[in-house]
Image: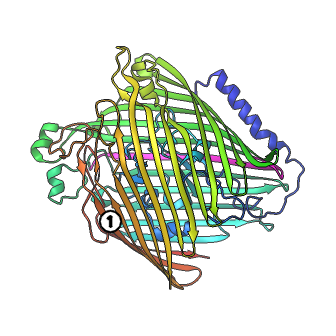
Amino acid sequence: MSGVNDFTLNKLAMAMAITVLPLTALAGEAMGAADDDGALGSAGPRIEVIRVKGNQLSHAHLETGTVVVISREQIDAIQPLSTEDVLRRVPGINIKGEEETSIVGNFGLRGLSASESKSLVLEDGVPVAPGLFIGNDRYFNPRIQRMDGAEILKGSASLRYGPSTIGGVVNYITKTPDDGVQLSGRIGSFNMREASIEAGGKNASGDGYAGVVATHAKSDGFMDKGYEMSDVMVKAGTAIGDNQRIGVKFSYHENDANISYRGLLLNDYLAGERYNPAPDDWYLTDRKAFDLNHEWAINDSATLKTLVYWSDITRDYWRYNVDTAASNAAGRWVYTDDLTGNNRSWERFGIETRLSLAHTLGDISADTEFGLRLMREESDDTRIRTTRAADRTGLNDRHIVDSADSIAGYVQSRIELSDRLAVTPGLRVESYEQKRVVLTQDNASAKTSNTEFLPGVGATFELTPSAQLYGGVYRAFSPASNGVALDGLTDQKLDGERATNYEIGIRGSEGALSYEVAAFAMDFSNQVVTGNSDPNLSQSNAGKTEHRGMELALAYDFGAGFSLDTNATWIPTSKFKTGDHQGNRLPYAPKFMANIGLNYSADKLKAALTAHHRGEQYGDPSNQVALPTGAGGGIWGGLLPAYTVLDLTAQYSVSSEFTLFGAVKNLTDKQYIAGLRQGIYVGPERSFEVGFRYRF
């Protein structure tokens, strides 16, 4: 990366020292044995998002907010094609689908628009969105094939992470291959073919491991939106001495997808046409990433965890220009021979360290965690103007370099006032500097900086041995990206988009029943809006929004192999309180969503019939109802009707080594609108999949 200032170099040097100092203690120490529950072991060190206290029941989380933990077994049962296949089953999450494998991630939490990015996405604790400060877009969506589980955290415990945790935190946990080799494959509708291999091994003492997870998938795609994807992840780790361990992960991802921002025009959608509306547009991505985790159990009361991460992402987006008049006449998009490449790359380097201390405050037990994160992001944004005959080579008429240096620190202490009551106050500080350089304007530049103080407090109370009450209040923020904060190469003097969040809930179990119920409120005080009384500025902090709702999750085991999993989300209020859209509902924020699954598990057979319901929602802030009939420019609005989709999945264990599985998705062939951009995005029609897993 270029252009790192002296202040940043000093920060990085300090962070490197934090990282290296614990490692100097490793010299001359012999290998130690592994054990369980956070001690040294082959699972590898990592920074946890969800924490459970000791051997308490599963409901007794340390976290003071709503918690969802998704296991490998649950993922296998869903048979997902994407991470969003998993997320849409989680209460509070709304998916704005664009294609069946969710190459571009679009989801919102608790009434936040699914077309924006107000929630933090992590993989093994590492941020995966290409730019958190320079452009928080989800141009990389992690692949479900490498995942062992997922954690979704909402509420006051989110302040351990940042930025953009207004809705919450989603953390995907990657697989650590077991001893041996597992081959898996599946085929399905739209000529979908997928093959994966997981191979791993441990040393004789069990405290060192290495493995690889690799997937190649190819499909013609629903509506001929084809793709070819390769994803490789290598992990290794070892214990060093009897109180330290280290883990490394390298991943590579490449995906060439025949997708675009174009959807069907209205008449073709109503007539049942299902074709690729932009057959010559391509979305090309690749990503390389490296993580290094180190854990040092300093003594029985202190643990230091350090994470170093780097990633490099490129996204080349080639789109043909449209002849609007000809498109209106034809009733479908008509393209010219002019081609534009909106090609961007992002590089990120970060270091995060966390010191956890178990101590007392007089006679009161407490666990305190101190955290520090240093990060630099840089993007290279080019726009290539060319023609169909020039084969993606042409004039670069816009070249922008964005960068951001950030430092964040937090302290959070869980204070056990009694055996039943714990209070967790905390404070996070995020400070960042953003810079934009426009190379195609004689290197004209601008920069801005901002610091956010984010306090929070939460509590848990054990009502009974099997029920826990929790709640909290905290402030969260989402930074204005470089393109907004430095619009027109002028410092727009924007604070982060701040929200004050409130939550109270209860979770627990009673016999065959387990449950969680939560009520929440989120108040935005200064969302970024367009328009400003200062003639030099175009953006301002003025927009306010209000969100109120409840989530319910309920599971019941009927016995004889039958069980029920269900959840519902009700958000009666998600509205603009100021500005041009005052009183309107936020786009992509349905009032009601629900999931219900009837499961059956016998000796060798597991099956599930699931239903996913999404209520009606608006496509833009104006809350217009009618869908556009022509090919006008801009992002489409309109009312998207409610829909319910049924899926049937099953898997059969032929032996302990060999499993067959299959699925019918959208069982009733429901036709529905999944989202809008420049046209209508159609939800995938009924599809079939069959596959196998074989371990040896």
Q: Nearer the viewer, residue 338 or 661?
A: 661
The number of numbered badges drawn on the structure is: 1
Pinpoint residue 524: horizontal percent, then vertical percent. 44, 36
The overriding secondary structure of the stretch rendered in magenta is strand
Q: In this view, does 73 lie to the left or right of 676?
A: right
Looking at this rendering, what residue extends furthest in the top direction?
535
Q: Name the residue under label 1.
A: 645
Pinpoint residue 100: horizontal percent, then vertical percent. 36, 58
Q: Give the range drawn in magenta.
A: 279-304
Please name the residue shown 78% across and 48% down the image. 364
> What amino acid type is highlighted by mark number 1?
Val
Pinpoint residue 360: horizontal percent, then vertical percent. 81, 46
Please name the residue shown 68% across and 44% down the image. 307
In which quadrant will I find the C terminus?
Answer: bottom right
Q: Nearer the viewer, residue 468 or 308?
A: 468
Pinpoint residue 18: horizontal percent, then vertical percent. 76, 37
Q: Where 275 sits versus 543, above or below?
A: below
Looking at this rendering, what residue extends furthest in the right direction?
28
Q: Can residue 610 be seen in this view?
A: yes
Q: Is residue 67 visible?
A: no
Q: Is disc 1 placed on a helix, strand or loop?
A: strand
Q: Nearer the viewer, residue 579 or 326?
A: 579
289 magenta-colored: yes
Q: Where 442 sits versus 545, above or below?
A: above
Q: Which of 691 and 153 is in front in this view?
A: 153
Image quadrant assignment for residue 327: top left
In which quadrant will I find the N terminus?
Answer: top right
Q: Is residue 220 left or right of residue 495?
A: left
277 magenta-colored: no
Q: Where 383 sits versus 115, above or below?
A: above
